[in-house]
Amino acid sequence: MALRCEVVTVGTELLLGQIVDTNSAWIGEHLATAGIDSHFQTKVGDNQGRIEEALRVALARSDAVICCGGLGPTQDDITRDAIAAVMGVALVRDEAMVENIRRIFGARGRDMAANNARQADRPVGAEFIVQTRGTAPGLICPVGDQVVYAVPGVPSEMEEMVERAVIPDLVARSGEPATIRSRVLRTWGLAESTLAELVGPRFDRLEGVEGAPTIAFLASGLEGIKVRVTVKAATAELADRALDAEEAALREILGELVFGVDDDTMESVVGSLLLGAGLMLGVAESLTGGLVGSRLTAVPGASNWFRGSIVSYASDVKHELLRVPPGPVVSATAATAMADGAARVLGASVGLGITGVAGPTEQDGMPVGTVFCGVSIGGSSTATELHLPGDRERVRWYATASVLDLLRRALLARG
Amino acid sequence: MALRCEVVTVGTELLLGQIVDTNSAWIGEHLATAGIDSHFQTKVGDNQGRIEEALRVALARSDAVICCGGLGPTQDDITRDAIAAVMGVALVRDEAMVENIRRIFGARGRDMAANNARQADRPVGAEFIVQTRGTAPGLICPVGDQVVYAVPGVPSEMEEMVERAVIPDLVARSGEPATIRSRVLRTWGLAESTLAELVGPRFDRLEGVEGAPTIAFLASGLEGIKVRVTVKAATAELADRALDAEEAALREILGELVFGVDDDTMESVVGSLLLGAGLMLGVAESLTGGLVGSRLTAVPGASNWFRGSIVSYASDVKHELLRVPPGPVVSATAATAMADGAARVLGASVGLGITGVAGPTEQDGMPVGTVFCGVSIGGSSTATELHLPGDRERVRWYATASVLDLLRRALLARG
């Protein structure tokens, strides 16, 4: 049976809805990847009795608990006290850790406030998880043959500690192979059900095979479908080799539907292709209103391959500035003219044009969701007509990703 | 003592982190507004035994439970079964509700699938909360003198039912005044601590006064600070009158820091001011890369007051297309020239220009976060220099909100 690990997130602001608890979702995803079950996840306020109760309820039905938050320096931060009470031990101050925290402040050119010494408190019998990002160390706290982990509530600090210390400790306790790695292939352009049909035979072949990778689909809303491959292996090298092989097998099936891997985004991939080809991009956008430019310029160093964008929202800006010929502005003709116009006006070698109906009402007799995308490379331009679902905001987002994907495919075809 | 109501959200996808549970945060915020305590919020998977356990644990320490999700038509949707088990009663099919669901499908031009009849199942002794948005009704299920509410997991369906039926039922049980209303004043430009100092005296005057409004600050990340006023009163009219009075008192203190109320956004407010003045806006953006245009065009009907935007990312696009004079492009001179150029090139009566350093590295000797905003109205233009905190993404977002706020203030000053 898989090890069971609950998550308890601490903070009155979570219960009041002032902050949405994204930490337990992140931890749940990483526990699942590591083959560890998480059947209950609980939010509790900054109240010692209730934190203790949440921990006791969790330990009554699971093997381990990750307790997230309440490790700050103030009197409100009482996770350490609650865990010590559940362990039935005293809380002691670790002077070496006080010095460590003082050094962290010193390195930032600041003095340690007296309060911060509380972060060096440790229930007797617990081990620290050394802090690398914030000032609070984490804790590994044995409770009989069970365990409670304490990690900070700041997402970046929590994530680093869970990946580095908590998951490996849980995996070691579970008796599973020591290394678990995963890789995400990012896809655009298919619904989850269609993707599942394509990958189905591969899925079936791996099912139940000892040591075979597992495959999961993660719908990521407006960012396409992620295909996550996970392997367990004795060493990192063996795990990576198995991931490489499975990635190759999936790419064979999915081809250009895969736009990137792991942290790649559609805009970072487009930027890399432009940079590699020595091309400069100019954009003309209408219904997206600047979303295409804003996504591209989210990539650091975009100035090496992006010239700019003309947001030609008013029709006569399209006609006058971009020289879109007279006639309907939601059309293939307008989209290619916008792509050519963007390249010309912005002094770019590649032009992208996008025009359509975002809603809420139809325009020139065209229904909401009608979108035309133009791509112009080296003076030759093509247009693609799309019909996108959803409300105004969804149509604009889908249109943005779709036009970037068309550019990506055009750049790949160019070789 | 305040009534205590826990929240149990149901769905294996929540535990796996495939979906972040935003429902419990939303419910928590609305319970707090209604003066109801929520000490624990639990996520549980689609497993009947574990849903029952979560409900029993919650009922052992609270007066009421809102159970969210698992009311769909499939075999996975077992919230109804789990509640019936906890109540110790049978689940019966309500034929009138089957007909109601069939009518809902009929109105959408579709046939009801046989499965959907499951949504008409009701534990003996429970009442339906009639559905107005989806196909699943909610449930009010007495358990002794306690109560379990079941609502769908689709946020829009859940929110409507909680506001219409669950909160009023809880408030009636609590013996508090029947009507609770709140209003949010949206502010931009001050840190929470500074805002708290300004409002502090008002806060102190209301504290502990019987029937006085309560005031809470909600940090909403990159969208400024929200000031929420809540009143309890015997009738909606009395509540609204008290809210009007408190809003007036707060506006007296905060003045132009308040940019809007409730669902207003910075872009919708700017749009209304432009429309009211019969002005058309043209934008020139550099570091924001299209974010200003994309936010403005998120407002339906933006074409009535927005002409377009020139995303002049490359310096020579600024010089050539917008006629920014030779010299550094991160400067007050460049910002006003961009504002003037945007108005001229786009045929607008109002121009906005924004240039600066988003990072990750400095530019022309200017540190990351240096931003210049230009506003041009009726041929007269001014520039404002800002120093914004954070990484590339935060600088770009703060810059976008800041330049829109400068335009808002300029339009207000114009009268």
Image: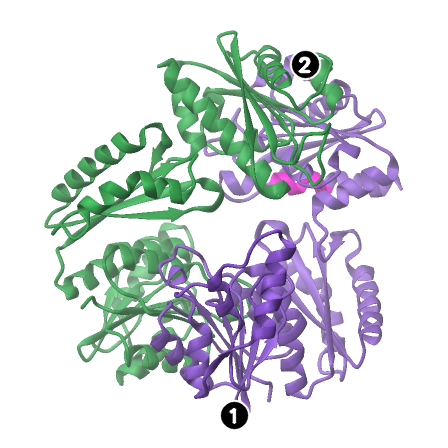
Chain colours: A purple, B green
| Dot 2 amino acid type | Val
Q: Which residues are magenta?
A: A397-405
- Give residue A243's mark: none
**In the rendering, at what x and y percent does residue B327 appear?**
73, 16
Q: Quadrant of residue A271?
A: top right
> Front-most of B48 and B309?
B309
The nearer-to-camera label among 1 and 2 is 1
| Dot 1 amino acid type | Gly
Q: Magenta span has A398?
A: yes
**Residue B315 visible:** yes
> Front-most of B244 and B161?
B244
- Which type of secondary structure does the marked residue at label 2 adopt? loop
**In the rendering, at what x and y percent does residue B274 appear?**
42, 19
Instruction: Judge if badges 1 and 2 mark residues of a common chain.
Output: no
Subunit of label 1? A
Dot 1 and dot 2 residues touching (CB under 8 Å): no
Magenta span: predominant SS is: helix
Q: Which residue is mark 2?
A: B324
Quadrant including the N terminus of chain B: bottom left
Q: CA distance from mark 1 to mark 2?
A: 71 Å
- Which type of secondary structure does the marked residue at label 1 adopt? loop
**Residue B294 visible:** no
**In the rendering, at what x and y percent does residue B288 appear?**
61, 32
- The residue under the point 63% across, 15% down is B333
- The residue under the point 76% across, 46% down is A269
Q: Which residue is mark 1?
A: A144
Q: Magenta span has A103?
A: no
